[in-house]
Amino acid sequence: MELKEKKNLMMLIAAAIVVIAVVLIMNVYRNASPTTSDQFASEIKTVNTQSDSDDIDSIENDLNETDVENLDSELRDIDNELNQIQY
């Protein structure tokens, strides 16, 4: 009977280790990607701080100040992730 109790105790310890590992991995994953939301928030703030004027010089200045170089980088990342999914 003692062997069965030791086996159950070892299985309980192994299950606890697995649960702790899963919680740690989820926590690391959750904290690993806040930069994208921070970048998004700063870009939105930049767009919202453009001038309210509708004269040509102000519009041209707003367009020059707007960073559109990496506009589709998020879409490329999503596309790559979708392509990795196997059906």
Image (cartoon, rainbow, N blue to C red):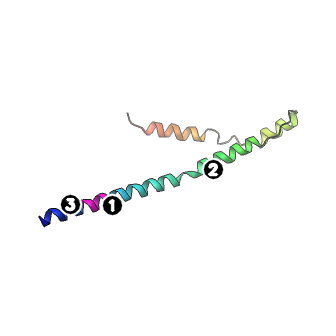
* Residue name at image x 33 percent, y 60 percent: 17
Magenta residues: mostly which secondary structure?
helix
Going from N to C along the chain, the mark reached first, 2 or 3, is 3
Going from N to C along the chain, the mark reached first, 3 or 1, is 3
Picture coordinates of residue 12 (x, y %)?
Answer: 26, 60
Q: Quadrant of the N terminus?
A: bottom left
Mark 3–mark 1 CB contact (< 8 Å): no
Give the number of the disc on residue 26: none
> Relative to 32, is 56 on the left or the right?
right
Picture coordinates of residue 77 (x, y %)?
Answer: 54, 41
Q: As shown in the figure, which amino acid type bears the numbered disc 2?
A: Asp
Q: Which residue is mark 2?
A: 38
Q: Is residue 12 magenta?
A: yes
Please name whichever residue, 78 or 6, is drawn nearer the observer in this view of the structure.
Answer: 6
Q: Nearer the viewer, mark 3 or mark 1?
A: 3
Q: Is residue 77 magenta?
A: no
Q: As shown in the figure, which amino acid type bears the numbered disc 1?
A: Ile
Q: As shown in the figure, which amino acid type bears the numbered disc 3?
A: Asn
Q: Residue furthest left?
A: 1
Please name whichever residue, 3 or 75, is drawn nearer the observer in this view of the structure.
Answer: 3
> Relative to 32, is 9 on the left or the right?
left
Q: Which residue is mark 3?
A: 8
Marks 3 and 1, Cα distance to the nearest angstrom?
Answer: 14 Å
Mark 2–mark 3 CB contact (< 8 Å): no
Q: Nearer the viewer, mark 1 or mark 2?
A: 1
> Relative to 49, is 12 on the left or the right?
left
Q: Which residue is mark 1?
A: 17
Picture coordinates of residue 75 (x, y %)?
Answer: 57, 37
Q: Which range is magenta? A: 11-15
Picture coordinates of residue 62 (x, y %)?
Answer: 80, 40
Q: Assign a secondary structure to mark 2.
A: helix
